[in-house]
Image: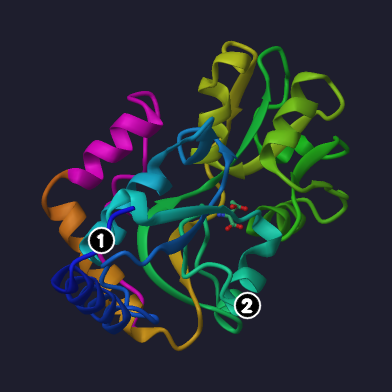
Amino acid sequence: MKFRSASAVAVLAAASLTLAACGGDSDSGSGDKVKIGIKFDQPGLGFKDGSKYTGFDVAVAKYVAGKMGYKENQIEWVQSPSKQRESMLKAGTVKMIFATYSITDKRKKEVAFAGPYFVAGQSVLVRADSNINDVTGLKGKKVCSVTGSTSVDNLKKEQPNLVPQEYDTYSACASALKDGVIDAMTTDDTILAGYANQTAYKGKFKLVGNTFSTEKYGVGLKQGDTDTCKKVNTAIQEMVKDGSWEKALKDNLGADYKFNAENNPPKAFEAC
Ligand code: GLU
């Protein structure tokens, strides 16, 4: 057995003091982890592939966390399904959420937002052989969307007599669409494009019609976390300026996805 020298013990003690000083809820790295909420089942946006996390939301989250002093291995990714996002932020289960999370006045009553870092729009996905051409063609059809999303609310506005088939995840909608259990699914064009491009569904689906909503993707935060809000807004602006934002979009959503160039990159940010 070896004995530690007195000086080694002193060094260790000093090191743990330094760690303690940097601990608590300081967000400037130094061994702390940060919990970030994302989707796990939305290819191109937030996707868990074994132990890897990919997608545009993930890329923006990594960039922002990096500017806040966190290395990639200090990020703990937590799955944040649509209907759980507000409660996860309120409970402090995660510090930030990057999960195709639209900024809305209703949500702002419960949580805060930084950003937006992207503006999407709602669209319709059908099987490749479908004769549905846009949202007006959904009348009397079985249409899937996700509980707790703006997509369900927007669909009800567009088709007041239709009762949406509400699932917990968009991946469940996509698989039901493939199997013929439903006639169409509706949500943000980004999400729909992601499934249409996924190997399992290649050639099986088509996106139809124009977008019929404006979905500003914000970074969800606990109400009152103005410090993080300001840091996130600054980081997003840097990401756009240095070209990483555009690269992340192209790398993750593919060359085929045409984003609304009038709304993107976003210029007006949430006041923190
Ligand atoms: N962006 C919409 C929302 O935040 C739909 C996508 C989603 O559910 O994540 O509700």
Q: Identity of the amino acid at label 1?
A: Ile
Q: Quadrant of the C terminus?
A: bottom left
Pick whichever, 266 or 108, lies toward us: 108
248 falls in the magenta region: yes
Label 2 sits on a secondary structure element that is helix
Q: Residue at x 75, y 35 (%)?
A: 172
Three-letter amino acid code of the residue under disc 2: Ala
Label ID, residue 236: 1
Q: Quadrant of residue 235?
A: bottom left
Q: Is residue 184 above or below residue 186?
A: above
Percent position (x, y) of residue 130? 73, 18
The answer to which of 141 and 83 lies nearer the viewer is 83
- Disc 1 on helix, strand or loop? helix
**Of helix, strand and loop, which mostly describes the magenta segment?**
loop
**Within 10 angstroms of label 2, few (less than 14), some, or many (20 or more) residues?**
few
Relative vertical location of residue 82 with respect to residue 114 in this rendering, above or below:
above
Residue under label 2: 91
Give the residue at the far front of this rendering: 1
139 inside magenta stretch: no
Q: Quadrant of residue 268?
A: bottom left
Q: How far is disc 2 from disc 1 in space, using C-alphas?
A: 25 Å
Q: Pick whichever of labels 2 and 1 is earlier in the sequence.
A: 2
Highlighted magenta segment, given as a residue range: 244-272
Residue 45 appears at what percent x and percent y? 47, 41
Residue occupying the far bottom of the picture = 224
Residue at 21 percent of width and 62 percent of height: 67
